[in-house]
Structures are given as C-alpha cells and as structure tokens.
Amino acid sequence: MIPARGAFYVRHARSQQMKQMMTWLVLVALGACGRATPSAPPTPAQEAPGPAAASASGPGSGSGPGSASGPSTSGATGADSSDSSDENADVVAAPACPPCPCPCDATDTPPSSAAISPSVRDKLTLTRVPFAEVPGWEADRHAQALPAILASCSKLDDVTDDAPMGVDGNGGRARHWRALCKGARAVAAGDDAAARALLERELVPYAAEGREGPEGKMTGYYVQALRGSRRRHGKYQTPIYGRPKDLVVVDLAAFLPDARGRRIWGRFDDKKGAVVPYATRAEIRRGHLRGQGLELLWVDDRVDALFAQIQGSGRVALDDGTEQWIEFAGKNGRSYRGVGKILRELGEPPGTGTMQGIRRYFAAHPDKFDEIADQNQSFVFFALSKKPGAVGSQGVVLTPRRSMAVDRAFVAAGTPIWVETRAPDAKGKVSPWRQLLVAQDTGEGIRGAVRGDIYWGDDEEATQIAGHMGGKGRYWLLLPRRLKVPAPAAAPAPAAPTSPPDTPTPAPPRPRRRR
C-alpha cells in the first residue's frame, strides 16, 4: 500500500536508488506515469504569470498541461557578435524531457512492471541566428503582432523583476522582458517599421530543433460557434457543464523537482485517501453529474458541443438574442483520443479525419455518435467568460493569427515565435505561411519541442482554415537580447575505425620522393 503522503518518503530517501523508486511510486499513487531517473536540479521556483509564464491549462485542442521535462541540456551558438558582450547577461538553458518509465497517459491505469519501458525523450536545441536568416521576416506586418505581445506584457504588472518566466524559468526573468514591453507601448498602431525596429533591438532569434529535427507538427484551432439557451427546452438538449466541485488538479512540481509544469486532474477519494481518476466521458453522459446543478447552458447540437471541448472555447448565440462566451475551466484528466484518429482506425476513407469530414460522418451516421465520441474519454468543463474572446492558458484573450498554443515544458508563455509552415485559405488552397506569433496557450495534444497550434479566430473563415490545417513547420524563438542561452555541447569526435577481426591493418602508403 502506498502512503498518501509518499512525498515525505521521497524527501527522506537514504539513497538515490530509493529516491528514484519512491518518486515513481508517488506518481503511481496519484494515477500518473512516473518519471525515471530524476535529476537533482535546484528546486524550481513557482511559475509566475508573466509574458513567458504558462498558467493552468487553457484552450487549444482539448487544452491540457505541457508535458514534463527534465534538466536543461540544450543551448545556442553565437551568431551575432554584437550580442555576446553583455557583461550582465543572464544564462538560461532550454529544457528537455526525461524518459518516462511507461508509455501510458497520466491518467491511465498504472501498468505492471512488465509493461514498463523507456520512451524516447524530446529535447529542445536553440541555435542563435541573425534576423537576416529568419525566412520571410522582413515581409511581415510586425505591428499587427504587438497587441498580442502587449496582452502577455500585462501579466508582468504584478510580478517582481526576479520572477521566473516559464517552467523553471526557461524564459528567463521578468526583468528581461520589461524593455520590450515598454517599447511596445510606445509604438503607434500600424507602424510596422517602428515595430520591426523594436523587435530587432530587444530580441534575438533562435532556431528551434527537437530530437527529430527542426520540423514539427503545426495545426490550427478556432472558437466553436454554438446555438443555445440558459434553460433546457425544445431542441436545446445537450448540456454545457461547469467545473464540478470535487474536481481537483495536482501540480506535480510540488512533489518532483523535474515535473516541469506537469499536472494531473482527478477527484479526491475520502475512503482511499488518494486522488483517483475522474468519471469518463461515457459516465458523464450517462448521468454522473446529474442533479449537481452544473448545467451552464443547453445547446442544440452535440457535435458542436464536442468541437467546443476539442477547441477549448466557444461562442454561444442564445435564444434570447444575446451572446455568451465560454472558456476552459477544467477537465476530467482522462486520456484524449482524437475523433478523426478513431474514425481512421475504423477504416473510414481519407478526409474523414478533418473537422469537415467528422461532421459529414456524424451527419450520415447520427446513431454512432455516442459510440465514437465515448472512445475519447477526455471531457472538458467550462465557465461563463466575463469578456468576449477566447482566453488562453496564460489568462489573456487570444489574438487571431497571432496567438499559438505550445508545449510549455519547452516554450514559456508570452514568448514571441516566428513560424514557417504551410496553411490553407478559406477555399482550401495551401500555400507557404510565415508570421510572428506569441505563445499564449497550451493544449492536450500539443506536446514536443517543435509543436504548435495556431489560433485562427472565431469566424467562419477561421473554422475552415483550422479545420483543414495540419502539416510540418519550423519556428524560431525570439528571446530577450540580454538573455543568454548556452551553446550546445560539441559532438564527440568519432572513434578511430578498427579493422575487422583477422584482417591485417594495411600499411600506410610510403611518401613519394620529390624530384
């Protein structure tokens, strides 16, 4: 039996081996995968809600926490000598994910020891480059990105200069961003030249690369439009649930020094004295929450309600002529499975996995909705938003085409990011797309060193673009000039070749005599 206060035993373990084992056991007791071979970095400071600080999970592809990661191992190479002479510059290393001893989700049933196997860990490597090497940089409308930057800057108002930005301070300190924020407030609206000059003066681009290379998956999301009512009647039969009172979230950083923002969701079981998984989507549909008064709204389309959960936000046109925005308030912590992937596994034809394809499928097979949707056990709870617009996990209203969801284990919220990818237009025509965005959100499926989910907005065009988007892309993090990222360690020299067994080593050729 695992003690409920297993963290006490981890803290007082007498050996590193025992500490590693007890760390894993604590996470199993909480219903999570353990992290093997935890290192012993300095105790991480509590994450601050600054322009590079990620907060609780928010919208964006079924919003959820960023994946866990471990000690800082990545770095950058100096490319601009004018930046290397700052005597007071601070050093920060980009993080990497440690191996997980099991391939399960954080809320899966802990596996037997036979099922435990190491997983490939991701790693973020940042290479410093000049702006001249950032593709398409000069062609952007830079002033259009400043409202998103200023939204993140607003989170700096209540923190000290030394407040760490991002998980373990992977975005530096609050003081590193103050000059950018001050300068952004002084730029006149629409002045692209001044905005570009400010960004180039205060920031330095770093090309990002994960273990699989510089390219990663780029997707898009939007605000789901719904039709609803504040009371159940007529066609309004699908509930939008608020957060249950017994839903709890456990910040693993309180238990592990290398948890890197990882959180698990569940409920506290008084009898077991432990946090256990919350009800599944199917159990909620069958009435698990009935009688608790959690129905915020009732909508007329269960497919719209499903997509609102996937996107993490919604805009509801009410039957009384008013409009109500809903925002992410929590989730049941169960494993997320994309509906499109479920349909593909069932043998549905290509194209069914897009948002438009999923809608066509459910329109043709309404009797299969529950059977398909219930295979995605994840369920999102909402709150009635007090302000219009989609609210990201950083706690700011997202800016269409300028905000992006990232894995906060690698990228601190509020970080400007230059993205190069391919994106469709409203008619489905795909073309190169390069633009400056700001990391302001997280998502359930947004995991990895190079992984982004672009917020397109709340109109029909945004719905069409996000619904068709999905492909490879690259990005560059724009970090404060005074923030120094260590250069990557040099690759070890290759070992001298050895001759095969029983094969004599050929004699080196004799030097020719000069005439």
Image: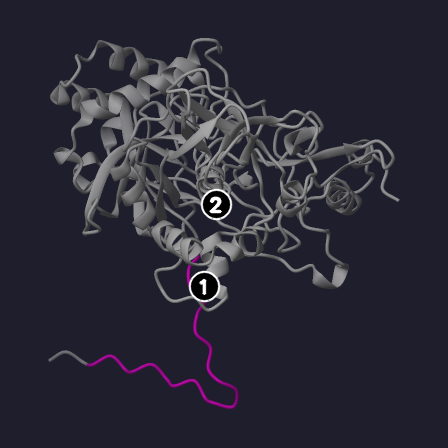
Q: Main secondary structure of the magenta part?
A: loop
Residue 65 on image: x %, y %: 54, 36
Nearest to the observer: residue 428 or residue 367 = 367
Front position in the image: 345 or 367: 367
- Would residue 78 be visible to someone looking at this image? no
Which residue appears at 46% of the width and 69% of the height?
Answer: 347
Residue in the image at 13% along x and 18% along y: 191
Q: Secondary structure at mark 1?
A: helix
Q: Disc 1 designates what residue?
A: 344
Looking at the image, the residue that sits furthest to the bottom is: 502
Identify residue for label 2. Answer: 447
Q: Which residues are magenta?
A: 492-512
**In which quadrant will I find the C terminus?**
bottom left
For the point 18% across and 81% down, the residue is 513
Q: Amino acid at mark 1?
A: Arg
Kindly state the secondary structure of the residue where label 2 is placed.
Answer: loop
Which one is nearer the viewer's eye here, 96 or 276? 276
Looking at the picture, which amino acid does disc 2 mark? Arg
Q: Nearer the viewer, residue 171 or 321?
A: 321
From this view, report whether residue 325 is shown above or below residue 71: above
